Image: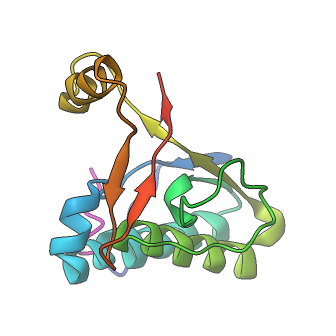
Amino acid sequence: MLDLKHPPKTWNLIPADIVVFCAGVSKIQECQEFPTETFSINLEGVIYLAEMYRKSGAFVIYLSSEDVFSGRETCYQAHEPTAPLTEYGRQKSIVEDFLLENLLTETAIIRLGKIIDPDYNLFQYCKDQLSQNRAFLRSTIDGSHQWSSMLY
């Protein structure tokens, strides 16, 4: 297991032609409360590992988030500029920018919406909101609200 919070000078990488990055701190509240700690994992650790795999010849697939956008609009296009309102979205956006600037032809970025399963606590919240005909909103760094879409 790799510790993204404390990347060593060298890791014993598992040889791979394609690497999918899905590790990191994805709890928005945790990123808001502990930006320095989550920055070291979500940016420094991921970028370090991505560079190592790229140097080994692997194609890098980075799982990002719709949170790189403000959420004030719907149906963003891939080429639109990012405008994150959360610390989590800001961290994802910085990694995307790095990958696009440094590994452009050797990387793919996939932006996911909120992914839930029936056992996730958010599922009950969503069910309650839907049963009461309420929208899904989430607070952001500046105190505004962001619309959230769900994949299930």
Q: Residue at x 64, y 78 (%)?
A: 97
Please state if 109 lies on the left or on the right of 40 as rendered: right
Q: Is residue 46 above or below residue 78?
A: below
Q: Is residue 39 above or below residue 134?
A: below
For the question of whether residue 102 can be seen, the reply is yes
Q: Is residue 93 above or below residue 27?
A: below
Q: Nearer the viewer, residue 48 or 12?
A: 48
For the question of whether residue 7 can be seen, the reply is no
Residue 124 drawn at (x, y percent): 21, 23
Q: Nearer the viewer, residue 100 or 133?
A: 133
Q: Nearer the viewer, residue 128 or 150?
A: 128
Q: Residue at x 26, y 50 (%)?
A: 1
Residue 109 drawn at (x, y percent): 67, 55
Residue 98 drawn at (x, y percent): 62, 80
Picture quadrant where residue 26 is located: bottom left
Magenta stretch secondary structure, dominant: loop
Please state if 34 lies on the left or on the right of 52 as rendered: left
Start-end of magenta stretch: 1-7
Q: Residue at x 39, y 79 (%)?
A: 44
Q: Return the residue found at the far front.
A: 133
Please state if 64 lies on the left or on the right of 56 as rendered: left
Picture quadrant where residue 72 is located: bottom right
Numbered marks: total: 0
Q: Residue at x 68, y 46 (%)?
A: 17
Residue 13 drawn at (x, y percent): 45, 57
Q: Is residue 79 magenta?
A: no
Q: Nearer the viewer, residue 124 or 16?
A: 124
Q: Is residue 4 magenta?
A: yes
Q: Is residue 126 above or below residue 37?
A: above
